[in-house]
Amino acid sequence: MEALNVERVKKSFRSDMMFSSKEILHGVSFSAREGEILGFLGPNGAGKTTTIKIILGLLRQDHGSVTIFDRPAGEKRSMSRIGYLPENPFYYPHLSLKEFLEFCGRLSGISNKKLDARCEEIISLVGLDRNKKQKIKSFSKGMLQRTGLAQAILHDPDLLILDEPFSGLDPGGRKTVRDIILELRNNGKTIFFSSHILPDMEALCDRTVIINNGAITKSIGLDEIFRIGENRIEITARGCSSKTLDDLRDYLERVDNKDEETFLFVKKQEYIRTVIQHIYNSGGEILKVANEHPSLEETFMNLVNGEKASAEKASEKSNSENEMKKEEVS
Amino acid sequence: MRRISSIALNTFRETIRQKLMYLVLIYIGILLFSVFVLSPLSVGAAKGKIIIDVGLAGISLFGVLTVIVAGSSLVHKEIEKKAIYSIVTRPVSRAEFILGKFSGIVFAMAPLMLSMVVVMAVMVLIGRGEVTVTVLLAAYLSMLEMVVMSAVVIFFSTFTSPILTSFFSLCFFVAGSLSGDLTVFANRFGGNSMKYFTKGFYYMLPNLKIFNLRHEAVHDLRFNSSDIGMTTLYALIYCAVILYFANLLFSRKEFS
Ligand SMILES: Nc1ncnc2c1ncn2[C@@H]1O[C@H](COP(=O)(O)OP(=O)(O)OP(=O)(O)O)[C@@H](O)[C@H]1O
Ligand SMILES: [Mg+2]
């Protein structure tokens, strides 16, 4: 079963001028399988928060649909299975942390009997034991973020939707959030979160959905990243003659020289042995063999830039085609 | 029900925090002023009546003004600061939110108004006056009026800013208190279209005149006691209708 399914969602916002409106989401579709951690990645202004707000019914889509565990989002039954951490959380300043969580718990239907113990448990889970009687008004940004996480997981939701859960947190806080996310996944929960911090995303996600300019560019699984990585075997050697390199030409993608060291990028995993042996036999020395997969960051930048580049190329191409046609005509 | 009461309790606490109880002190000041400055000017039995007159008018006015001032920013602040995200993303319907806010304000206002009634009664008794049933009923009707105005404030606050909410609610209060006169005025001076316009406006407005029993209370006149029941019923129906429309608007609202 799919925990979350977003289907061809479109959304326009009225711009400052009265009658014009600008489409921000152009038919966004993706889904999160039950029990996975799905990352939501995209540059500023791509439409992540807008998409998340539509899922939660804070905004209404102009087109398309959202289902949660195969039921329409917005139904009470669906809403009770979701936990949500907003982008810049803000809560009632006049309440203390404990009072606020109790309030949230009542709204989510936690019984009075269990409420107190559950609040205490969550407060210590997010590391705010010392602040539970403090008014939220006086909380720092990171403490607010932790409060936000606490209210999101309070009612033990099956689907957690977190809008930039790592923002404003110190290293300890990040680790706490990472641990909580992993722990929840191990308990069979589904987590969908947006983030700018790529290493966090890379370390946590089973899959990542990339959004750019209001459209889903790509959905990648970690295994796919590793598959890309097969092409990226890098051998660092010393004392390779140009003849040796010439012999190996067919096996290599690219060769870089720096000082006395040579960096050889091997085309395929199977070739490593051949390449290394040949270097040895011709008197070279192997310094390092690394199997690096490109980070999500690289993939991400490539995708974002690649899209721009291909768009430019396409327009160039059509321009030149037009010119050619003109020439033909004349 | 538990969800509504939680929201109501939260609203209650938020409203109480605005230090409304200081208003009671101002109220006491006004009553003392009327006792020591205005009463000596009048003669005989009129003396006791002045406290009742000023006291009841004060309860009505303070009640309505406080609801408008304290209530108009409640919903808006919650949307502006995004605190509402933690409510409407839970299994809470928009109607429950509206009802919670409404009852929260009403429950915050009730002790305020009750303490004004007590203050007035004590002062009347000190002046060896008599607190008649009519006086208490008049105070009760003022509280009903406050309940109706709370609903009006909630209605406006679902779609406009705090300032406009205060403004529109105040207009409703003034026009509602005059509503009978308004149609008379239109009939006398207005053209046909003016007549329909004022008629439409008239039916939308709460008829606040019927919540005014002060004249009868001051002069201890007789009144039709079944009117009290009818007025209560009217208040409940008016609240239900206007809150229904508030919910209709609020359900379509986006939070961005
Ligand atoms: N209420 C609104 N009215 C008009 N435009 C809006 C509104 N909300 C968002 N937008 C526009 O929609 C686009 C997407 O915004 P969104 O907040 O979804 O981006 P995001 O991906 O969350 O960015 P970030 O990484 O900075 O949080 C932006 O161009 C923004 O200007
Ligand atoms: Mg965002």
Image (tube, coloured by chain):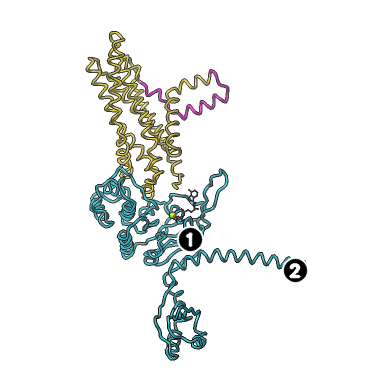
Chain colours: A cyan, B yellow
Q: Secondary structure at mark 1?
A: strand
The magenta segment is B188-212
Mark 1 lies within 8 Å of ligand 1 (Cβ measured):
yes
Q: Residue at x 32, y 35 (%)?
A: B18
Q: Residue furthest bottom?
A: A281
Residue type, mark 2 in image: Glu
| Mark number, residue B77 | none
Dot 2 crowding, Cα within 10 Å, few <14, some 14–19, many 20+ = few
Q: Residue at x 43, y 90 (%)?
A: A283
Q: Residue furthest right?
A: A330
Q: CA distance from mark 2 to mark 1?
A: 41 Å
Q: Position of residue A156 (x, y in %)?
A: 31, 57
Tag 2–tag 1 contact (CB < 8 Å): no
Q: In front of the other: label 2 or label 1?
A: 2
Say if residue A1 shows up in the picture: no
The residue that disc 2 covers is A328
Residue type, mark 1 in image: Ile
Q: Can you tell which quarter of the image residue A278 is in?
A: bottom left
Q: How many marks?
A: 2
The residue that disc 1 covers is A211
Q: Residue at x 22, y 14 (%)?
A: B128
| Residue B155 part of the magenta segment | no
Q: Tell whether B212 sits left or right of A15.
A: left
Q: Position of residue B227 (x, y in %)?
A: 36, 23
